Protein backbone atom coordinates (compact mmCIF):
# COMPACT_ATOMS: atom_id res chain seq x y z
CA UNK A 1 0.00 0.00 0.00
CA UNK A 2 2.85 2.35 0.82
CA UNK A 3 4.46 1.62 -2.54
CA UNK A 4 1.24 2.56 -4.34
CA UNK A 5 1.04 5.81 -2.39
CA UNK A 6 4.65 6.63 -3.23
CA UNK A 7 3.99 5.87 -6.87
CA UNK A 8 1.06 8.32 -6.95
CA UNK A 9 3.15 10.97 -5.17
CA UNK A 10 6.02 10.55 -7.65
CA UNK A 11 3.59 10.68 -10.57
CA UNK A 12 1.99 13.91 -9.37
CA UNK A 13 5.37 15.50 -8.61
CA UNK A 14 6.65 14.51 -12.05
CA UNK A 15 3.58 16.01 -13.70
CA UNK A 16 3.85 19.20 -11.69
CA UNK A 17 7.58 19.82 -12.02
CA UNK A 18 7.53 18.72 -15.64
CA UNK A 19 5.05 21.48 -16.56
CA UNK A 20 7.12 24.67 -16.56
CA UNK A 21 4.12 26.93 -16.93
CA UNK A 22 2.28 25.33 -14.01
CA UNK A 23 5.45 25.47 -11.91
CA UNK A 24 5.90 29.16 -12.67
CA UNK A 25 2.28 30.20 -11.98
CA UNK A 26 2.02 28.10 -8.79
CA UNK A 27 5.40 28.53 -7.10
CA UNK A 28 7.30 31.45 -8.59
CA UNK A 29 4.59 33.90 -9.67
CA UNK A 30 2.86 34.49 -6.27
CA UNK A 31 6.04 35.50 -4.48
CA UNK A 32 7.27 37.49 -7.48
CA UNK A 33 4.02 39.43 -7.80
CA UNK A 34 3.84 40.16 -4.08
CA UNK A 35 7.41 41.44 -4.18
CA UNK A 36 6.71 43.64 -7.20
CA UNK A 37 3.38 44.96 -5.91
CA UNK A 38 4.61 45.75 -2.41
CA UNK A 39 7.83 47.28 -3.73
CA UNK A 40 5.96 49.56 -6.12
CA UNK A 41 3.43 50.51 -3.44
CA UNK A 42 6.28 51.34 -1.05
CA UNK A 43 8.00 53.37 -3.74
CA UNK A 44 4.75 55.17 -4.51
CA UNK A 45 4.12 56.04 -0.87
CA UNK A 46 7.70 57.21 -0.43
CA UNK A 47 7.55 59.36 -3.55
CA UNK A 48 4.26 60.86 -2.37
CA UNK A 49 5.94 61.83 0.90
CA UNK A 50 9.15 63.16 -0.64
CA UNK A 51 7.24 65.05 -3.34
CA UNK A 52 5.82 67.39 -0.74
CA UNK A 53 9.16 67.69 1.02
CA UNK A 54 11.03 68.81 -2.10
CA UNK A 55 8.47 71.39 -3.18
CA UNK A 56 9.11 74.93 -1.94
CA UNK A 57 6.19 76.33 0.07
CA UNK A 58 5.80 79.89 1.32
CA UNK A 59 4.48 80.39 4.84
CA UNK A 60 3.12 83.89 5.34
CA UNK A 61 2.88 84.81 9.00
CA UNK A 62 1.00 87.75 10.51
CA UNK A 63 1.99 88.93 14.02
CA UNK A 64 4.90 86.50 14.24
CA UNK A 65 5.78 85.90 17.94
CA UNK A 66 9.46 86.61 18.56
CA UNK A 67 9.86 83.37 20.51
CA UNK A 68 8.57 81.25 17.60
CA UNK A 69 10.45 83.00 14.79
CA UNK A 70 13.60 80.83 15.17
CA UNK A 71 11.46 77.66 15.20
CA UNK A 72 9.63 78.51 11.98
CA UNK A 73 12.71 79.81 10.18
CA UNK A 74 14.62 76.55 10.79
CA UNK A 75 11.67 74.16 10.53
CA UNK A 76 12.23 73.00 6.94
CA UNK A 77 14.73 73.83 4.20
CA UNK A 78 11.94 73.84 1.58
CA UNK A 79 9.86 76.32 3.62
CA UNK A 80 10.18 80.06 2.99
CA UNK A 81 8.85 82.10 5.94
CA UNK A 82 7.61 85.63 5.18
CA UNK A 83 6.27 88.00 7.83
CA UNK A 84 3.46 90.12 6.39
CA UNK A 85 -0.24 90.89 6.99
CA UNK A 86 -2.76 88.43 5.54
CA UNK A 87 -5.71 89.75 3.56
CA UNK A 88 -8.93 88.09 2.41
CA UNK A 89 -7.56 88.25 -1.14
CA UNK A 90 -4.59 86.13 -0.04
CA UNK A 91 -6.96 83.55 1.42
CA UNK A 92 -9.03 83.52 -1.79
CA UNK A 93 -5.87 82.79 -3.81
CA UNK A 94 -5.41 79.57 -1.84
CA UNK A 95 -8.73 78.22 -3.09
CA UNK A 96 -7.86 79.06 -6.71
CA UNK A 97 -4.37 77.52 -6.25
CA UNK A 98 -2.82 80.78 -7.42
CA UNK A 99 -0.26 80.60 -4.62
CA UNK A 100 1.59 77.67 -3.08
CA UNK A 101 1.46 78.83 0.50
CA UNK A 102 0.23 78.37 4.05
CA UNK A 103 -1.12 81.46 5.80
CA UNK A 104 -0.70 81.72 9.58
CA UNK A 105 -2.35 84.55 11.50
CA UNK A 106 -1.38 84.95 15.16
CA UNK A 107 -3.57 87.13 17.40
CA UNK A 108 -2.14 90.19 19.01
CA UNK A 109 -0.60 89.75 22.47
CA UNK A 110 0.12 86.10 21.66
CA UNK A 111 3.27 86.16 23.80
CA UNK A 112 1.19 87.04 26.86
CA UNK A 113 -1.19 84.19 26.06
CA UNK A 114 1.70 81.75 25.89
CA UNK A 115 2.74 82.92 29.34
CA UNK A 116 -0.73 82.04 30.66
CA UNK A 117 -1.99 85.60 30.93
CA UNK A 118 -5.56 86.42 29.95
CA UNK A 119 -5.98 88.87 27.10
CA UNK A 120 -7.99 91.97 28.00
CA UNK A 121 -9.37 90.06 30.99
CA UNK A 122 -11.91 88.37 28.69
CA UNK A 123 -11.03 84.88 29.77
CA UNK A 124 -11.24 83.75 26.12
CA UNK A 125 -8.26 81.88 24.78
CA UNK A 126 -6.66 83.51 21.72
CA UNK A 127 -7.06 81.62 18.46
CA UNK A 128 -4.33 80.97 15.87
CA UNK A 129 -5.67 80.76 12.31
CA UNK A 130 -3.92 78.56 9.74
CA UNK A 131 -5.23 78.74 6.17
CA UNK A 132 -4.19 76.14 3.60
CA UNK A 133 -5.44 74.00 0.69
CA UNK A 134 -5.63 70.27 1.49
CA UNK A 135 -5.45 69.26 -2.18
CA UNK A 136 -1.86 70.55 -2.20
CA UNK A 137 0.33 67.81 -0.70
CA UNK A 138 3.19 70.14 0.16
CA UNK A 139 0.93 72.71 1.82
CA UNK A 140 -0.88 69.98 3.75
CA UNK A 141 2.45 68.72 5.05
CA UNK A 142 3.43 72.22 6.22
CA UNK A 143 0.03 72.65 7.87
CA UNK A 144 0.45 69.43 9.84
CA UNK A 145 3.96 70.40 10.94
CA UNK A 146 2.88 73.88 12.08
CA UNK A 147 -0.16 72.45 13.89
CA UNK A 148 2.07 69.92 15.63
CA UNK A 149 4.54 72.60 16.71
CA UNK A 150 1.78 74.79 18.13
CA UNK A 151 0.10 71.82 19.80
CA UNK A 152 3.30 70.99 21.68
CA UNK A 153 3.66 74.50 23.11
CA UNK A 154 0.76 74.38 25.53
CA UNK A 155 -2.95 74.85 26.08
CA UNK A 156 -3.07 78.60 26.59
CA UNK A 157 -4.46 79.19 23.07
CA UNK A 158 -6.54 77.43 20.42
CA UNK A 159 -5.81 76.60 16.78
CA UNK A 160 -8.33 76.91 13.93
CA UNK A 161 -11.44 77.33 16.04
CA UNK A 162 -14.07 79.10 13.87
CA UNK A 163 -14.82 82.56 15.23
CA UNK A 164 -17.87 83.13 13.02
CA UNK A 165 -20.38 81.04 11.12
CA UNK A 166 -19.08 79.72 7.81
CA UNK A 167 -15.43 80.39 8.56
CA UNK A 168 -13.23 77.63 7.18
CA UNK A 169 -9.50 77.20 7.19
CA UNK A 170 -9.10 74.50 4.56
CA UNK A 171 -9.60 76.49 1.36
CA UNK A 172 -9.99 73.44 -0.87
CA UNK A 173 -13.43 73.56 -2.46
CA UNK A 174 -15.81 70.62 -2.20
CA UNK A 175 -15.45 70.13 -5.94
CA UNK A 176 -11.64 70.02 -5.86
CA UNK A 177 -11.66 67.59 -2.92
CA UNK A 178 -14.15 65.37 -4.74
CA UNK A 179 -12.10 65.54 -7.93
CA UNK A 180 -8.97 64.55 -6.01
CA UNK A 181 -10.74 61.56 -4.45
CA UNK A 182 -12.26 60.28 -7.68
CA UNK A 183 -9.05 60.79 -9.65
CA UNK A 184 -7.46 58.25 -7.31
CA UNK A 185 -10.34 55.73 -7.33
CA UNK A 186 -12.21 55.81 -10.64
CA UNK A 187 -9.28 55.04 -13.00
CA UNK A 188 -8.67 51.77 -11.15
CA UNK A 189 -12.38 50.88 -11.18
CA UNK A 190 -12.76 51.62 -14.89
CA UNK A 191 -9.64 49.65 -15.83
CA UNK A 192 -10.81 46.68 -13.76
CA UNK A 193 -14.28 46.77 -15.34
CA UNK A 194 -12.88 46.98 -18.86
CA UNK A 195 -10.38 44.20 -18.23
CA UNK A 196 -13.02 41.94 -16.69
CA UNK A 197 -15.08 42.39 -19.85
CA UNK A 198 -12.12 41.42 -22.02
CA UNK A 199 -11.31 38.45 -19.79
CA UNK A 200 -14.88 37.17 -20.05
CA UNK A 201 -14.83 36.80 -23.83
CA UNK A 202 -11.29 36.89 -25.29
CA UNK A 203 -9.94 33.51 -24.06
CA UNK A 204 -12.98 31.61 -25.35
CA UNK A 205 -12.83 33.40 -28.69
CA UNK A 206 -9.35 32.17 -29.65
CA UNK A 207 -8.18 29.55 -27.16
CA UNK A 208 -11.73 28.18 -27.06
CA UNK A 209 -11.74 27.72 -30.83
CA UNK A 210 -8.38 25.96 -30.62
CA UNK A 211 -9.78 23.67 -27.92
CA UNK A 212 -12.93 22.89 -29.95
CA UNK A 213 -10.99 22.49 -33.19
CA UNK A 214 -13.01 25.14 -35.03
CA UNK A 215 -9.97 27.36 -35.53
CA UNK A 216 -8.91 25.10 -38.40
CA UNK A 217 -12.13 25.90 -40.27
CA UNK A 218 -11.47 29.63 -39.97
CA UNK A 219 -7.88 29.27 -41.12
CA UNK A 220 -8.82 27.47 -44.35
CA UNK A 221 -11.45 30.04 -45.37
CA UNK A 222 -10.48 32.38 -48.23
CA UNK A 223 -9.48 35.35 -46.09
CA UNK A 224 -6.18 36.93 -45.22
CA UNK A 225 -4.83 36.09 -41.78
CA UNK A 226 -4.37 39.75 -40.85
CA UNK A 227 -8.08 40.33 -41.59
CA UNK A 228 -8.92 37.47 -39.25
CA UNK A 229 -6.66 38.90 -36.54
CA UNK A 230 -8.05 42.43 -36.89
CA UNK A 231 -11.63 41.14 -36.91
CA UNK A 232 -11.04 39.18 -33.71
CA UNK A 233 -9.49 42.14 -31.88
CA UNK A 234 -12.07 44.73 -32.98
CA UNK A 235 -15.06 42.51 -32.21
CA UNK A 236 -13.69 41.55 -28.81
CA UNK A 237 -13.01 45.22 -28.05
CA UNK A 238 -16.57 46.21 -28.95
CA UNK A 239 -18.17 43.56 -26.76
CA UNK A 240 -15.83 44.32 -23.85
CA UNK A 241 -16.56 48.03 -24.22
CA UNK A 242 -20.29 47.39 -23.78
CA UNK A 243 -19.56 45.47 -20.60
CA UNK A 244 -17.36 48.27 -19.27
CA UNK A 245 -19.88 51.00 -20.09
CA UNK A 246 -22.64 49.03 -18.39
CA UNK A 247 -20.58 48.69 -15.21
CA UNK A 248 -19.59 52.36 -15.28
CA UNK A 249 -23.21 53.48 -15.61
CA UNK A 250 -24.09 51.26 -12.66
CA UNK A 251 -21.44 52.96 -10.50
CA UNK A 252 -22.51 56.46 -11.58
CA UNK A 253 -26.17 55.77 -10.76
CA UNK A 254 -25.33 54.25 -7.39
CA UNK A 255 -23.16 57.15 -6.16
CA UNK A 256 -26.06 59.14 -4.63
CA UNK A 257 -27.11 55.98 -2.77
CA UNK A 258 -23.57 55.48 -1.51
CA UNK A 259 -23.60 58.85 0.24
CA UNK A 260 -27.28 58.60 1.31
CA UNK A 261 -28.50 61.63 -0.65
CA UNK A 262 -32.24 62.17 -0.92
CA UNK A 263 -34.14 64.37 -3.34
CA UNK A 264 -33.16 66.18 -6.52
CA UNK A 265 -31.52 69.10 -4.72
CA UNK A 266 -29.54 66.70 -2.58
CA UNK A 267 -28.35 64.87 -5.68
CA UNK A 268 -27.19 68.15 -7.18
CA UNK A 269 -25.35 69.05 -3.98
CA UNK A 270 -23.77 65.61 -3.94
CA UNK A 271 -22.57 66.03 -7.52
CA UNK A 272 -20.94 69.31 -6.54
CA UNK A 273 -19.36 67.80 -3.44
CA UNK A 274 -18.04 64.80 -5.36
CA UNK A 275 -16.46 66.95 -8.04
CA UNK A 276 -18.79 65.88 -10.86
CA UNK A 277 -18.55 69.11 -12.86
CA UNK A 278 -17.03 67.97 -16.12
CA UNK A 279 -17.15 69.51 -19.59
CA UNK A 280 -17.93 67.97 -22.95
CA UNK A 281 -14.20 67.82 -23.64
CA UNK A 282 -13.69 65.79 -20.47
CA UNK A 283 -16.33 63.26 -21.47
CA UNK A 284 -14.96 63.07 -25.03
CA UNK A 285 -11.42 62.46 -23.77
CA UNK A 286 -12.70 59.79 -21.37
CA UNK A 287 -14.62 58.04 -24.15
CA UNK A 288 -11.63 58.06 -26.50
CA UNK A 289 -9.23 56.73 -23.89
CA UNK A 290 -11.69 53.99 -22.90
CA UNK A 291 -11.92 52.93 -26.55
CA UNK A 292 -8.13 52.89 -26.85
CA UNK A 293 -7.79 51.00 -23.56
CA UNK A 294 -10.22 48.26 -24.58
CA UNK A 295 -8.52 47.96 -27.97
CA UNK A 296 -5.08 47.32 -26.49
CA UNK A 297 -6.44 45.06 -23.74
CA UNK A 298 -8.19 42.89 -26.30
CA UNK A 299 -5.01 42.82 -28.37
CA UNK A 300 -2.83 41.68 -25.47
CA UNK A 301 -5.28 39.04 -24.23
CA UNK A 302 -5.77 37.76 -27.79
CA UNK A 303 -2.02 37.25 -28.16
CA UNK A 304 -1.85 35.29 -24.91
CA UNK A 305 -4.95 33.27 -25.83
CA UNK A 306 -3.41 32.33 -29.17
CA UNK A 307 -0.40 30.91 -27.34
CA UNK A 308 -2.57 28.89 -24.93
CA UNK A 309 -3.63 25.30 -25.55
CA UNK A 310 -7.16 25.71 -24.18
CA UNK A 311 -9.37 28.16 -22.29
CA UNK A 312 -8.14 27.07 -18.87
CA UNK A 313 -4.54 27.48 -19.96
CA UNK A 314 -5.37 30.92 -21.38
CA UNK A 315 -6.85 31.99 -18.05
CA UNK A 316 -3.67 30.92 -16.29
CA UNK A 317 -1.51 32.86 -18.73
CA UNK A 318 -3.62 36.03 -18.54
CA UNK A 319 -3.77 36.14 -14.72
CA UNK A 320 -0.28 37.66 -14.19
CA UNK A 321 -1.02 40.22 -16.89
CA UNK A 322 -4.31 41.10 -15.19
CA UNK A 323 -2.57 41.65 -11.85
CA UNK A 324 -0.03 43.97 -13.47
CA UNK A 325 -2.83 46.04 -15.02
CA UNK A 326 -4.64 46.20 -11.67
CA UNK A 327 -1.42 47.33 -10.01
CA UNK A 328 -1.07 50.11 -12.58
CA UNK A 329 -4.60 51.17 -11.66
CA UNK A 330 -3.53 51.56 -8.02
CA UNK A 331 -0.66 53.94 -8.76
CA UNK A 332 -2.80 57.14 -8.97
CA UNK A 333 -3.57 56.68 -5.26
CA UNK A 334 0.06 57.52 -4.51
CA UNK A 335 0.42 60.59 -6.71
CA UNK A 336 -0.82 64.15 -6.68
CA UNK A 337 -2.69 64.46 -9.98
CA UNK A 338 -1.65 63.29 -13.43
CA UNK A 339 1.96 63.12 -14.56
CA UNK A 340 3.41 65.91 -16.70
CA UNK A 341 6.11 63.63 -18.14
CA UNK A 342 5.20 62.94 -21.77
CA UNK A 343 7.18 59.69 -21.73
CA UNK A 344 4.61 58.23 -19.32
CA UNK A 345 1.95 58.46 -22.02
CA UNK A 346 3.90 56.08 -24.24
CA UNK A 347 3.56 53.23 -21.71
CA UNK A 348 0.65 50.96 -22.68
CA UNK A 349 -2.21 50.67 -20.15
CA UNK A 350 -0.56 53.09 -17.73
CA UNK A 351 -0.96 55.95 -20.21
CA UNK A 352 -4.74 55.40 -20.23
CA UNK A 353 -4.80 55.46 -16.44
CA UNK A 354 -2.88 58.74 -16.38
CA UNK A 355 -5.30 60.36 -18.85
CA UNK A 356 -8.27 59.20 -16.74
CA UNK A 357 -6.56 60.68 -13.69
CA UNK A 358 -6.15 63.99 -15.53
CA UNK A 359 -9.82 63.99 -16.57
CA UNK A 360 -11.19 63.33 -13.09
CA UNK A 361 -8.81 65.81 -11.43
CA UNK A 362 -9.72 68.58 -13.93
CA UNK A 363 -6.18 68.65 -15.35
CA UNK A 364 -6.93 67.49 -18.90
CA UNK A 365 -4.26 68.25 -21.52
CA UNK A 366 -5.21 67.20 -25.04
CA UNK A 367 -1.60 66.63 -26.04
CA UNK A 368 -1.35 63.74 -23.59
CA UNK A 369 -4.64 62.34 -24.89
CA UNK A 370 -3.37 62.39 -28.48
CA UNK A 371 -0.06 60.77 -27.50
CA UNK A 372 -1.97 58.05 -25.64
CA UNK A 373 -4.35 57.40 -28.54
CA UNK A 374 -1.60 57.26 -31.16
CA UNK A 375 0.67 55.03 -29.07
CA UNK A 376 -2.17 52.62 -28.25
CA UNK A 377 -3.18 52.39 -31.92
CA UNK A 378 0.44 51.65 -32.81
CA UNK A 379 0.65 48.94 -30.13
CA UNK A 380 -2.62 47.47 -31.41
CA UNK A 381 -1.17 47.37 -34.93
CA UNK A 382 1.86 45.50 -33.59
CA UNK A 383 -0.48 43.06 -31.82
CA UNK A 384 -2.43 42.48 -35.04
CA UNK A 385 0.84 41.72 -36.83
CA UNK A 386 1.87 39.33 -34.03
CA UNK A 387 -1.52 37.59 -34.03
CA UNK A 388 -1.31 37.23 -37.82
CA UNK A 389 2.06 35.52 -37.45
CA UNK A 390 0.56 33.15 -34.90
CA UNK A 391 -2.36 32.31 -37.20
CA UNK A 392 0.21 31.48 -39.89
CA UNK A 393 2.07 29.12 -37.54
CA UNK A 394 0.77 25.56 -37.43
CA UNK A 395 2.94 24.92 -34.38
CA UNK A 396 1.09 27.59 -32.43
CA UNK A 397 -2.42 26.99 -33.74
CA UNK A 398 -2.42 23.21 -33.47
CA UNK A 399 -0.28 22.68 -30.38
CA UNK A 400 -1.53 20.09 -27.89
Image (cartoon, rainbow, N blue to C red):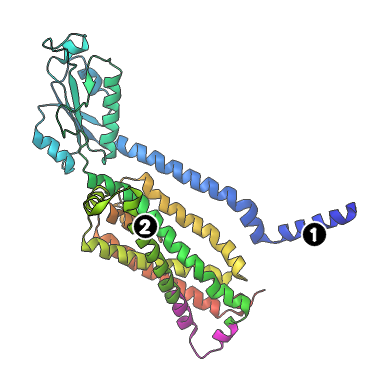
Indicate left or right for 113 with 352 as reference. Answer: left
Residue at numbered disc 1 = 11
220 is within the stretch colored magenta: yes
| Camera sees residue 362 | no
Indicate left or right for 208 with 239 as reference. Answer: right
Residue 133, position as x, y percentages in the image:
22, 38
Q: Secondary structure at mark 2?
A: helix
Q: In this rendered view, identify the residue nearer to me: 272 or 259.
A: 259
Give the quarter of the figure containing the N terminus: bottom right
Indicate left or right for 92 with 320 as reference. Answer: left
Residue 24 position (above or below residue 312): above
Question: At x 64% / y 54%, what residue is drawn?
Answer: 26
Indicate left or right for 171 with 19 as reference. Answer: left
Question: At x 50% / y 67%, what residue is drawn?
Answer: 200
Report, in whole angstroms, how far the alpha carbon at label 1 lies from the one at label 2: 49 Å
Q: In this rendered view, identify the residue nearer to me: 274 or 363.
A: 274
Res 395 quadrant in image: bottom right
Residue 186 position (above or below residue 213): above
Residue at numbered disc 2 = 251
Residue span colored magenta:
216-233
Question: At x 29% / y 54%, what residue is drawn?
Answer: 360
Residue 328 position (above or below residue 375): above
Amino acid sequence: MKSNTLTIIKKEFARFFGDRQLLFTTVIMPGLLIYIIYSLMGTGIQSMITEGQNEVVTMRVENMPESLAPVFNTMDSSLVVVQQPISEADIAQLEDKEINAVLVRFPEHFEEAMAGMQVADSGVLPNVEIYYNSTNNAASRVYMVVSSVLGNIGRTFTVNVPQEEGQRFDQASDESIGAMIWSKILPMLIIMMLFSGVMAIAPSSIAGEKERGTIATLLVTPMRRNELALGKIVSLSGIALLSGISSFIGIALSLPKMIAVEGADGAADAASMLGFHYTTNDYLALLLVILASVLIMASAVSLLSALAKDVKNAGTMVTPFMLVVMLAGLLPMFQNGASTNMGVYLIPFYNSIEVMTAVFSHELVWTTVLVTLVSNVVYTGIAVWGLTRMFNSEKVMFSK
